[in-house]
Image: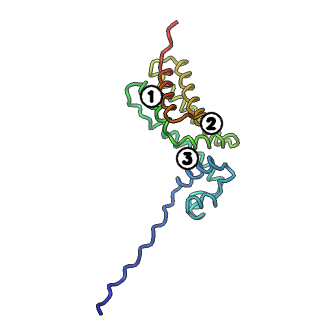
Amino acid sequence: MPAQPPRTPKARPARKTLDRDSWLKKALDVLFAQGISQIKIEVLARKLKLTKGSFYWHFKNRDDLLRSMVDWWRNNQLKFIESLDHSMPDPEARIRAVIAFTQHTEDSNHDIAMREFARFNKHAARAVSEVDELRVAYLAELFTAAGFDSIEASLRARTLYFYQVGEYTTSLAPEPETRARLAERLHQLLTRHPASD
């Protein structure tokens, strides 16, 4: 009887990579869907299919997680603002691009969650305030580049920002087709220069 070839030991499945960002993103997901009371180590570990040991590899405790969650959200928002395309020569085209982007982003749930958390957490409130100010300042720069004076640029920046935030923090979000038409009309209205007196 021929000798059997030696068995090759089965490779063990690779352990799931320990990823700090995964914990933070999942914490924001839970904050949005279930509220602050459900941001628990056991809940997050179960959702991520990781052990509590993984949690303690990255965080000292739940308070460290909550503070890190706020910082992670804030830093990601600031990085995004810094990464926006400043090379597009036509400022009106850049305004259109910003409006178009916000029609399709999935980041709004985290925004909603952080704003709710900011109602009773000072660290989150400071982060939301800083992000709001920088977003509006960026939009004001775009409208200034499009030829509006400082008051007009500030008004249009705030109008656009309040419209965008209001759309995803209320129950009035229209169907995608209607939303696209409204976005185009919004761009037309905001980039139209007022008639001279």
Among the 4 quarters of the image, the one containing residue 123:
top right
Q: Earlier in the sequence, mark 2 or mark 1?
A: 1
Estimate the x, y position of residue 21 in percent, counting from the top left: 52, 52
Number of other residues with Cα within 10 Å of mark 1, as a class: few under 14, some 14 to 19, many 20 or more: some
Q: Position of residue 185 (x, y in %)?
A: 49, 24
Q: Position of residue 10 (x, y in %)?
A: 41, 76
Q: Is residue 43 above or below residue 123?
A: below
Question: Which residue is more in the foreground, 81 or 101?
Answer: 101
User: According to the image, what is the colour scheme of the structure?
Assistant: rainbow
**Gap between marks 1 and 3, in whole Å?**
28 Å
The residue where tag 1 is placed is 96
Q: Quadrant of residue 119?
A: top right
Q: Amino acid type of disc 3?
A: Trp
Q: Is residue 126 above or below residue 183?
A: below
Residue under label 2: 171
Q: Which mark is on residue 26?
A: none
Q: How many marks?
A: 3
Q: Residue at x 55, y 59 (%)?
A: 48
- The reply to whether the C-beta atoms of the residues labelled 2 and 3 are less than 8 Å apart is no
Given contact means CB atoms under 8 Å apart, are the residues at marks 2 and 1 in contact?
no
Secondary element at image label 2: loop
Say which amino acid is labelled 1: Arg
Label 3 packing within 10 angstroms: few (<14), some (14-19), many (20+)? some
- Which residue is tagged 3? 72
